[in-house]
Amino acid sequence: MDYIDCCPTTGTLIVRARPGRSQAAGPVAGHQELVSTP
């Protein structure tokens, strides 16, 4: 499932298209992934 989420703190779009990775960890993984890969 590919969906775009917006982070209210940074105001950046977070794209999570990895089932198990993002879904398992939740929005925390999405935020970390965004910081790791700009």
Image: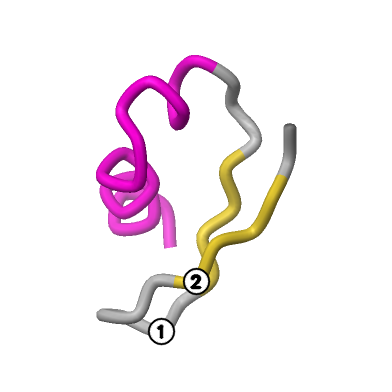
| Residue 26 percent location from the top left of the image | 35, 36
Main SS class of the magenta portion in the image: helix
Q: Amino acid at mark 1?
A: Gly
* Residue count near mark 2 (Cα–Cα under 10 Å), binned few <14, some 14–19, many ≥20: few
Q: Which quarter shows the N terminus?
A: top right
Q: Are marks 2 and 1 in contact (CB under 8 Å)?
A: yes
The residue under the point 59% across, 20% down is 19
The residue under the point 51% across, 60% down is 14
Mark 2 and mark 1: Cα distance apart in space: 6 Å
Secondary structure beneath label 2: strand
Quadrant of the rendered image containing residue 35: bottom left
Q: Which quarter shows the C terminus?
A: bottom left
* Residue count near mark 1 (Cα–Cα under 10 Å), binned few <14, some 14–19, many ≥20: few
State the residue in front, 29 or 33. 29
Q: Earlier in the sequence, mark 2 or mark 1?
A: 2
State the residue in front, 37 or 24. 24
| 29 vs 7: above or below | above
Q: Amino acid at mark 2?
A: Cys
Quadrant of the rendered image containing residue 16: top right
| Residue 23 percent location from the top left of the image | 46, 27
Question: Magenta span covers which residues?
Answer: 20-38
Where is mark 1, residue-wise?
A: 11
| Residue 22 percent location from the top left of the image | 45, 31
State the residue in front, 37 or 26. 26
Residue 6: numbered disc? 2
Secondary structure beneath label 1: loop
Tell me: 9 left or right of 24.
Answer: left
| 29 vs 32: above or below | above
Residue furthest top in the image: 20
